Image (tube, rainbow, N blue to C red):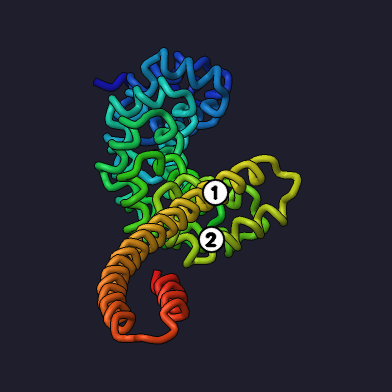
Amino acid sequence: MNSAVNSTTTKQIENLKQLPLKDLFDLMINFSNDENIQEQLILEIRKRSKYKKNANEIVELKGIEIIIKSMNNFSNNQDIQENGCFALANIALEEKNANEIVELKGIEIIIKSMNNFPNNQDIQENGCLALANIALGNEKNRNKIVELKGIEIIIKSMNNFPNNQNIQENGCLALANIAVEEKNRNEIVELKGIEIIIKSMNNFPNNQDIQKNGCLALGNIAVEEKNTNKIVELKGIEIIIKSMNNFPNNQDIQKYGCLALANIAVEMKRKSKFIFQNQNQNQNQNQNQNQNQNQNQNQNQNQNQNQNQNQNQNQNQNQNQNQNQNQNQNQKINYIFY
């Protein structure tokens, strides 16, 4: 049950910046059904969540649960959804915090918010960032995002807002972090994730964060040969090298660009080695066939030689003159046959 809004509460709300985090969450609990108060409180929590110390304190105060409850209670309030997603994104930078968000069904509320407001760019931006940070934690978190169609919603958001640099940046990062497992990479490729990453990098060649996240995403996706072929087909190598040339002093772009090119090269080399091995196998088969043919030829030659020897013997017996010369000639003929 909500408490009555008295003068003290009103004064607190007017001075939210001065209140400790504990008091903010106490107010959220006491006025859980007051949409206006929830909106103001979650905005202040969003601002404070940017700092690691505050993010950890929010977790200790059971703040994740309170934020998610507010987002569930006011699912039609776009401001609460936007600021709630942003607060969860900041809190999720610590793996243990990300794990708690997952346990409290935070992924569900983030994806629900993105689905409910597909045209709200701020919700899409913050939702992509939240999923990116949660995906960085562990395989279980990534699997949950995939299970809830998170890859699909990220790519949809990037396609819907191709000119929003923040959505492109956060979307590329989310896909990069999700693309650690093979099945996730395959789903990204099937949903044309490579296309949207390369398109984003082409559209914003001067945005270093998009270039960095794009290189990282392509590098992670390029672990399988079929994915490498798709990247090459879509001129991914050219865009990676262009990015590295454009930002020679950005260490992250250089690092992730090298990673991407290395993974692409490994798969292409593996493919070439496979072809070379197949060629060797064919050569061995041809050599065996040639050996069999040579053996058959030798057998035929031996048969012909025996026939010729018999003929020579008959000739020698019939010849009465120059026997020594004929014997020498026969020896020469024998050497030729052998």
Dot 2 amino acid type: Gly
Q: Residue at x 45, y 53 (%)?
A: 273
**Label 2, residues with CA under 10 Å away: few <14, some 14-19, many ≥20:** many
Q: Quadrant of residue 243?
A: bottom right
Give the residue pinned by disc 1. Answer: 260
**Disc 1 vs disc 2: Cβ atoms closer than 8 Å?**
yes
How many numbered marks does the figure carry? Answer: 2
Give the residue pinned by disc 2. Answer: 236
CA gap between label 1 and label 2 equals 10 Å
Q: Residue at x 43, y 47 (%)?
A: 223
Answer yes or no: is residue 113 visible: no
Disc 1 element: helix
Answer yes or no: is residue 151 visible: yes
Residue 7 coordinates in the image, percent (x, y):
45, 19
Residue 297 coordinates in the image, percent (x, y):
31, 72
**Label 1, residues with CA under 10 Å away: few <14, some 14-19, many ≥20:** many
Lateral position of residue 27 relative to residue 263, left or right: left
Lateral position of residue 170 relative to residue 180, left or right: right
